[in-house]
């Protein structure tokens, strides 16, 4: 499974990347809005992990454009902005899940597995 991590906090982005790579996901990183959009225009992903507070834009504005380029990807919003309006806005824009920071990488992984089962019909034993 191919994952794009859009996250400007580099330490966190690398932590997620390390963790998911060990679980056999293939990861790409983007540290901002524009960089994320560029990757989505070129590549197809199974998962897009999207931070909302990006230095050059709001992840919520990225979501509709992202879905145009990667309509079949599963979107998980990762953000410290845990307020209700942002959660609802993200889900309304078509995010599949929402993980408030700080989150545990194990929880991220099990949510990704849950989405893979639901959305991609991946069998339990085939999951990383
Ligand atoms: Ca951020």
Image (tube, helix red, strand yellow):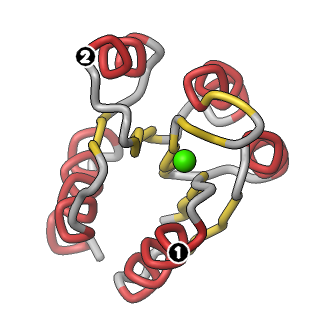
Determine which of the numbered discs, if any, sits on residue 84 in the image.
2
Q: Are marks 2 and 1 in contact (CB under 8 Å)?
A: no
Image location of residue 49, percent across then percent down: 48, 49
User: Alpha-carbon neighbours of circle 1 within 10 Å: few (<14), some, or many (≥20)?
Assistant: few
Residue 25 drawn above or below residue 92? below
What residue is pinned by disc 1?
11
At horizontal 28% and vertical 31% (from top left) the residue drawn is 82
Image location of residue 104, percent across then percent down: 21, 65
Determine which of the numbered discs, if any, sits on residue 79 in the image.
none
Q: Is residue 85 left or right of residue 56?
A: left
Residue 66 drawn above or below residue 117? above
Please indicate, yes or no, whether residue 78 appears anywhere in the rendered image.
yes
At horizontal 56% and vertical 38% (from top left) the residue drawn is 53
Viewer-closest of 11 and 47: 11
User: Alpha-carbon neighbours of circle 2 within 10 Å: few (<14), some, or many (≥20)?
Assistant: few
Quadrant, the C terminus:
bottom left
């Amino acid at each position: 499974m191919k994952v794009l991590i859009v996250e400007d906090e580099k330490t966190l982005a690398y932590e997620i990347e390390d963790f998911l790579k060990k679980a056999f996901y293939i990861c790409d990183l983007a540290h901002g809005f524009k960089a994320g959009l560029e990757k989505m225009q070129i590549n197809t992903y199974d998962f897009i992990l999207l931070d909302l507070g990006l230095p050059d834009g709001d992840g919520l504005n990225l979501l509709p454009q992202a879905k145009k380029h990667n309509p079949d990807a599963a979107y998980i919003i990762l953000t410290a902005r845990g307020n209700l309006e942002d959660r609802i806005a993200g889900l309304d824009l078509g995010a599949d899940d929402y993980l408030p920071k700080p989150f545990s990488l194990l929880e991220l992984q099990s949510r990704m597995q849950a989405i893979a089962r639901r959305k991609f019909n991946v069998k339990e034993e085939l999951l990383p």
